[in-house]
Amino acid sequence: MKKIGFTIGKFAPLHKGHEYLIEKALEETDEFYIVIYDTDVTKIPVEARAKWITDKYKNAKILYAYNSPKQYGLDDESVRIQMEYLTKQIDGIPVNCFYSNEPYGEKVAEYLHIENRTVDINKKQVPISASKIRENLEYYKTFLEPNIYEDICRFKNTEKSEPLEE
């Protein structure tokens, strides 16, 4: 049986921890999907964040998750809302494993009746999170590819989101 995996995230920004997870998943799966959520935590549009991933990981398949729910948490209601949304995003894709480095991975896998594959959940291999980077970009910029750091700086200095130049 083909191993078809997926992960979800905002990738705001894509950092070495995300890369570690994606690389592990690409090694272990025949097909790997990345669901990228829109978000208001960054000015950088979902398409630009997807480009960071596709530039580095040609074999990853991107699914854009627009108008995503804003209710997060591991309580039953939040999980239900998120899972109803996520199920629509992956509709028709026969996924059989979910990759994450967060506690919600167990809930996603349980809901979908698929394998839960946690990667560096304690962040010992790559001790970083996107929220830390957003809080102190200069301090944590070593966890970013140079082009991503440059994009963040460029978007940070614009009044509104502008598309990346090709």
Image: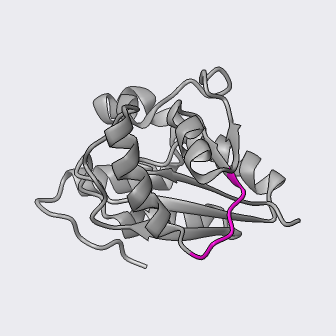
Colouring convention used in this rendered image of the protein: one colour
Judge whether 58 appears above or below 86 on screen.
below
- The count of marks equals 0
Q: Nearer the viewer, residue 76 or 28?
A: 76
Residue 105 picture quarter: top right
Task: Report if residue 93 lies within the magenta region.
Answer: yes
Farthest left residue in view: 159
Residue range corresponding to the magenta coloring = 92-97
Task: Report if residue 147 lies within the magenta region.
Answer: no
Residue at figure coordinates x 26%, y 44% from the top left: 71
Q: What is the x, y in percent for residue 81? A: 34, 51
Type of secondary structure dominating the magenta stretch: loop
Q: What is the x, y in percent for residue 106? A: 59, 36
Q: What is the x, y in percent for residue 72? A: 32, 40
In the rendered view, does 108 fall on the left or right side of 153? right
Quarter of the rendering occupied by the N terminus? bottom right
Farthest right residue in view: 1
Q: Nearer the viewer, residue 26 or 100?
A: 100
Q: Nearer the viewer, residue 95 or 59?
A: 95
